[in-house]
Amino acid sequence: AFEQQKYDQALARALEARQIYEAVGDRSSVASLDGNLALLSRVQGRYDEALAYNQNDLDYVVETGDRHGEAVALGNRAYIYWDAGELDTALACLERALRIAGELGDAWEAARHRAGLAGLHAARHERQRALADFQRAIPVLRTHGASFYLVDPLLDAAELLIEEGELA
């Protein structure tokens, strides 16, 4: 339902599932579902709601020591703040996510967050920083076969290069 942009239907089903998970005391599934509810709320422009769901997800992964989950939740949190126009907070979240992914030695996750940082630098009109981050992220994403995650960075990098007059 989510991919078909039937957001109300997706939300209703997700909330039903959440009630079941809560009833049986499955905190892990509640937190995971909250991560998805945060994304769903974000695309609908309900940023406060998205942040609340994301916070529950983030609290759970931190409490359980899931550092990879923490990096993912922080990355998702960054995009909520970014969409809400809070670029400085988004930057801080992405930098933390990148640092955690680096500490874990997770090159793919780090590249994903670095590509996000590059896009954010571009949005902040920091073109050289954006291009440098794109140059570091894109080869890793390509190596890991993450074509879905390559589309936006490649398009954003091309747009910056066109603006700089380096790409016709």
Image (cartoon, rainbow, N blue to C red):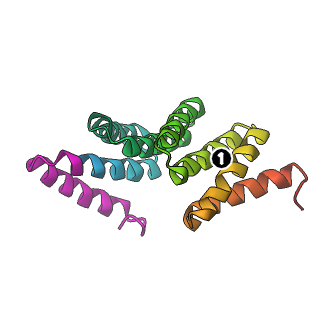
- Please name whichever residue, 95 or 8, is drawn nearer the observer in this view of the structure: 95
Residue segment shown in magenta = 1-29
Q: Residue 167, how many percent across, how many down?
A: 87, 59
Residue at 30 percent across and 63 percent down: it is: 9
Query: Given the image, on which type of amino acid does mark 1 rest?
Result: Gly
Give the dominant element type of the magenta stretch: helix, strand or loop.
Answer: helix
- Please name whichever residue, 30 or 137, is drawn nearer the observer in this view of the structure: 137
Q: Residue 71, how many percent across, how many down?
A: 44, 42
Q: Work out which residue is located at the far front of the displayed protein and give it.
A: 105
The picture quadrant where one finds residue 3 is bottom left
Residue 151 in magenta stretch: no
- Above or below: residue 113 compared with residue 147: above
The picture quadrant where one finds residue 74 is top left
Residue 22 in magenta stretch: yes
Q: Residue 152, how many percent across, how many down?
A: 63, 58
Query: In the visual, does 92 lie left or right of 12?
Result: right
Q: Residue 160, how many percent across, how many down?
A: 79, 50
Residue at 38 percent across and 64 percent down: it is: 2
Residue at 55 percent across and 47 percent down: it is: 110
Q: Which residue is mark 1?
A: 119
- Please name whichever residue, 98 or 8, is drawn nearer the observer in this view of the structure: 98
Residue at 74 percent across and 44 percent down: it is: 132
Quadrant in which the N terminus appears? bottom left
Label 1 packing within 10 angstroms: few (<14), some (14-19), many (20+): many
